[in-house]
Image: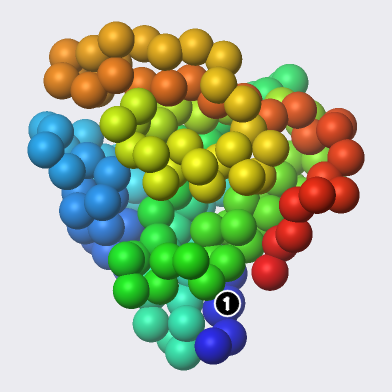
Amino acid sequence: MECAISPARHEDAQRIASLSARLIEAGLPKSWSAWRVERFIRRRDSVVLTARVDEKFVGFAIMRFADETAHLNLLAVAPESQRRGIGRRLIGWLEESAIVAGTFTVSLEVRADNADALRFYAALGYHETDVIPGYYNGIVDAALLARDLRVCKTDLEYD
């Protein structure tokens, strides 16, 4: 399996929105439309990546950069492609971009009821900084996570 990570193209917006609706926004009102994803593809302060295996779309990540921090808006990998290092590669690409840009803190929110995602981010060195009750449309709590990229990644392995 060879995974290719690359910047998203205009035609990827609908695939990204659909995967987000299915995996991230399940049970919630949909907020990541193809139109919103396209806006992030065009923004100069954001990076939208896609992951493809044998040219098949299998995942994506969206991160917005500010002067001192970066914020991971979304990350998803199709269930049939999970646990193959694709999510780690997406995060690795974005973290390296942040370091090159001089940004050393990455933050994100994740559904507090998503144990798999919490374990994934913890394995990458992210730690919980807060919990916001009802963050997702008053329905689901959010765990706020962050990582200081200046901390050595010796225990982390990116595929």
Q: Residue at x 20, y 49 (%)?
A: 21
Coordinates of residue 158 in the picture (x, y in percent): 71, 62
> Looking at the rendering, which quadrant does residue 149 occupy?
top right
The colour scheme used here is rainbow
Q: Which residue is mark 1?
A: 4
Coordinates of residue 29 in the picture (x, y in percent): 11, 33
Q: Is residue 72 left or right of residue 116?
A: right
Coordinates of residue 106 in the picture (x, y in percent): 65, 30
Q: Is residue 59 left or right of residue 13?
A: right
Residue 40 seen in the current view: no
**Mark 1 neighbour class, 10 Å CA radius: few under 14, some 14 to 19, many 20 or more:** some
Q: Residue at x 61, y 51 (%)?
A: 91
Q: Residue at x 44, y 27 (%)?
A: 109
Instruction: Check disc 1 and report its element: helix, strand or loop.
Output: strand
Q: Quadrant of the C terminus?
A: bottom right
> Looking at the rendering, which quadrant does residue 117 occupy?
top left
In-front residue for pair 60/144: 144
Coordinates of residue 102 in the picture (x, y in percent): 83, 33
- In this view, 139 is above or below 64: above
Q: Quadrant of the N terminus?
A: bottom right
In-front residue for pair 72/112: 112
- In this view, 28 is above or below 33: above
Question: Looking at numbered disc 1 in the image, what kind of residue is underneath it?
Answer: Ala
- In this view, 156 is above or below 50: above
For the image shown, how many numbered marks are present on the structure?
1
